[in-house]
Image (tube, grey):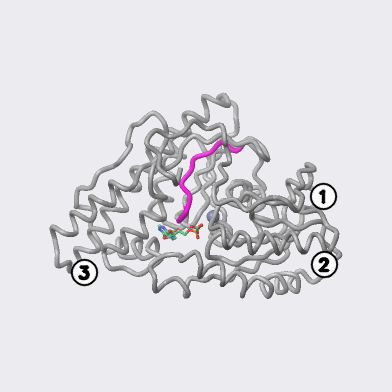
């Protein structure tokens, strides 16, 4: 299966195969990051991203096929991310995938990018359903029960900023470069978490997140201490990261309780963490603690497969094709595409929920 990913700022193409034993194998995995193009703006610029996908995608596909080593005829199908994401970029990858499927007379799968993240633990760790997924990246913050392909129950989402976005904004207001997450983690390592910051949503019964208030509190603490010296920036980073760790631990614990209530005490207890924020060691430690306390195993796919990539799209395509879930050439690109359309709206949720 060839998978194409263009929903944000990574142009990616990959070929994966499912063996007779059901295990996945990545045969090629090409990711062309556009980080340099967006860094000067402190975030992803949608129009720049869409144009860059046009420039980068054909050679990314060519490279993925060369690494695979066989001809297009050897493919069983083509899968492309169709949403949710930046619409201009999605159109580039989706149209390319459709054109290839049409020309090659192969089945086509329009993939939900969130579903691809949700299923990738099957590819990387051979994990069976069901499991609890914490998806934390620059664009998504969700807690989901993954029951089967196409069967997801959303337990929690963010009412405002995504977790990675909160790290990026925290970095920006402290004068650290983009993307902020790794910078905040690095800087926090030489800081003391002594500055008091709020823990939004702690103890709430539904495992939703809210991060805008924490960011505002951080800004106020920074203004109070201006001009900021290096040690104060480090202390602010450490305090922010501790606040996020407490929030993530509490919200995930709540989701674990709901998971056990919904599926019964006998259901497999596994927590999968995906998305760029999963790289953060302090947050990982916090999740490891809560997993241990509740008898869950913690599954964190390798960083290259936690962040956006084509292999997860190809794998979702493989899973869907096996179930006869193909799409025709009218499949639209979708800026918004919830995995669980029946989830009750989160009270107070903005456009990002
Ligand atoms: O999954 P990803 O590569 O791209 C998408 O957003 O889809 O995630 C990128 C996000 C950025 O917001 C980045 O700041 C955050 O993940 N991130 C981190 C760390 N590494 C990346 N956040 C906290 N700590 C990190 N070490
Ligand atoms: Zn993603």
Badge 1 element: loop
| Residue name at image x 27 percent, y 62 percent | 173
Q: Which mark is residue 20?
A: 1
**Residue 200, how many percent across, how many down?**
30, 40
Q: Which mark is residue 91?
A: none
Ligand 1 lies in quarter: bottom left
| Residue name at image x 33 percent, y 59 percent | 169
- The magenta-colored residue range is 137-146
- The quarter in which the N terminus is drawn is bottom right
Badge 3 element: helix
Crowd band around label 1 with a 10 angstrom C-alpha radius: few (<14), some (14–19), many (20+): few
Relative horizontal placement of residue 151, taking residue 198 as reference (left or right): right
* Alpha carbons under labels 1 and 3: distance apart: 55 Å
Crowd band around label 3 with a 10 angstrom C-alpha radius: few (<14), some (14–19), many (20+): few
Q: Main secondary structure of the magenta part?
A: strand
**Residue 145 within the segment the image draws in magenta:** yes
Mark 2 or mark 3: name the one nearer the start of the chain: 2
Q: Which mark is residue 230?
A: 3
Task: Tell me whether circle 2 and circle 1 mark residues in contact (CB < 8 Å).
Answer: no
Mark 2 or 3, closer to the camera: 2
Task: Tell me whether circle 2 and circle 3 mark residues in contact (CB < 8 Å).
Answer: no
Q: Disc 2 marks which residue?
A: 72
Mark 1 or 3, closer to the camera: 3
Q: Residue furthest front?
A: 330
Task: Tell me whether circle 1 and circle 3 mark residues in contact (CB < 8 Å).
Answer: no
**Residue 84, how many percent across, how many down?**
56, 51
Give residue 149's quadrant in the image: top right
């Amino acid at each position: 299966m060839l998978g194409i990913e263009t929903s944000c700022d990574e142009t990616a193409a990959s070929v994966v195969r499912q063996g007779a034993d059901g295990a996945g194998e990545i045969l090629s995995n090409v990711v062309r990051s556009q980080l340099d193009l967006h860094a000067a703006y402190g975030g992803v610029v949608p129009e720049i991203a869409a144009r860059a996908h046009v420039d980068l995608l054909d050679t990314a596909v060519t490279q993925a096929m060369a690494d695979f080593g066989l001809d297009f005829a050897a493919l069983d199908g083509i899968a492309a991310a169709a949403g949710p994401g930046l619409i201009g970029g999605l159109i580039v990858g989706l149209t390319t995938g459709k054109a290839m499927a049409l020309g090659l007379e192969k089945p086509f799968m329009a993939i939900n990018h969130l579903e691809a993240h949700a299923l990738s633990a099957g590819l990387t760790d051979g994990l069976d359903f069901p499991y609890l997924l914490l998806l934390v990246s620059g664009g998504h913050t969700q807690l989901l029960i993954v029951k089967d392909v196409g069967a997801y129950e959303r337990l929690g989402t963010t009412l405002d900023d995504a977790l990675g976005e909160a790290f990026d904004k925290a970095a920006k207001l402290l004068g650290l470069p983009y993307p902020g997450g790794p910078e905040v983690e690095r800087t926090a390592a030489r800081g003391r978490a002594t500055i008091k910051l709020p823990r939004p949503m702690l103890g709430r019964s539904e495992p939703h997140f809210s991060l805008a208030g924490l960011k505002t509190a951080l800004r106020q603490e920074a203004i109070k201490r201006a001009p900021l010296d290096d040690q104060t920036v480090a202390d602010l980073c450490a305090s922010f990261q501790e606040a996020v760790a407490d929030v993530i631990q509490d919200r995930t614990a709540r989701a674990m309780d709901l998971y056990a209530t919904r599926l019964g005490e006998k259901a497999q207890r596994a927590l999968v963490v995906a998305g760029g924020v999963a790289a953060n060691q302090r947050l990982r430690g916090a999740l490891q603690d809560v997993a241990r306390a509740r008898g869950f195993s913690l599954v964190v796919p390798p960083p290259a497969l936690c962040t956006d990539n084509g292999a997860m799209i190809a794998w979702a395509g493989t899973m869907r094709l096996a179930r006869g879930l193909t799409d025709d050439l009218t499949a639209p690109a979708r800026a918004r595409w919830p995995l669980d359309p029946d989830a009750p709206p989160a009270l107070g949720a903005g456009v990002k929920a």
